[in-house]
Amino acid sequence: MSWIRLRVYRSRPYRAWFRNLDIKTQRIIDARIDIARRDGILIKHKLLDQETSLYEFKWDSGLRVYFSLLQDKDGNFLLLLQGGNKNSQKENIGSAKNVILKAVRSILGKKKKIEEK
């Protein structure tokens, strides 16, 4: 059996949200992210939008972390986009989609500049 190791990147909105959580909640989230990074196993996740590759990690407490699975020349990576809870789900999904679009524009812009040289 081969394992897929994932690089993990955290967007600014995700980092800002995460910093405001209590230590216990941060550790719960980090444990699941570490399993994904180390073993390539995504626990309790759901595809929300195929076009943007938007997924969510869910916890029974209502906690949500929105992420995208992407690939570049170096392999697969997980981009943590936004976090929240069930009550703010609609708003957080909209924010997560905006982060994906900005990231893709940024990546494409850099690629275009490299190709032009």
Image: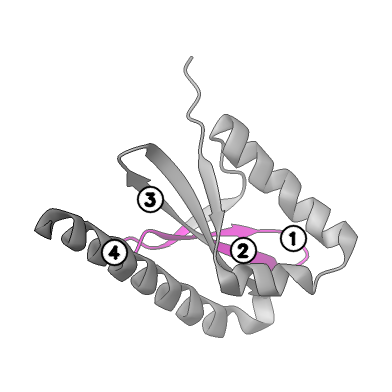
Q: What stretch is highlighted in magenta?
A: 47-66
User: From the viewer's perspective, is 46 left or right of 39?
Assistant: left
Q: Is residue 86 above or below residue 36?
A: below
Q: Which amino acid does label 2 sit on?
A: Val
Q: Which residue is drawn at 48% across and 73% down?
A: 96
Please, what secondary structure does the residue beneath circle 3 have?
strand
Please, what secondary structure does the residue beneath circle 2 have?
strand
In the rendered image, which residue does mark 4 sit on?
Answer: 51
In the rendered image, which residue does mark 2 sit on?
Answer: 65
Q: Which amino acid does label 1 sit on?
A: Asp
Q: Which mark identifies residue 70?
A: 3
Measure how far apart labels 1 and 3 are at the Cα level: 26 Å
Measure how far apart labels 2 and 4 are at the Cα level: 18 Å
Q: Which mark identifies residue 89?
A: none
Viewer-nearest of labels 1 and 3?
3
Task: First in sequence, mark 3 or 4: give its number.
Answer: 4
Residue 62 appears in view: no
Task: First in sequence, mark 1 or 2: give its number.
Answer: 1
Name the quadrant containing residue 92: bottom right
Task: First in sequence, mark 1 or 4: give its number.
Answer: 4
Q: Position of residue 88 (x, y in %)?
A: 63, 83
In the rendered image, which residue does mark 1 sit on?
Answer: 60
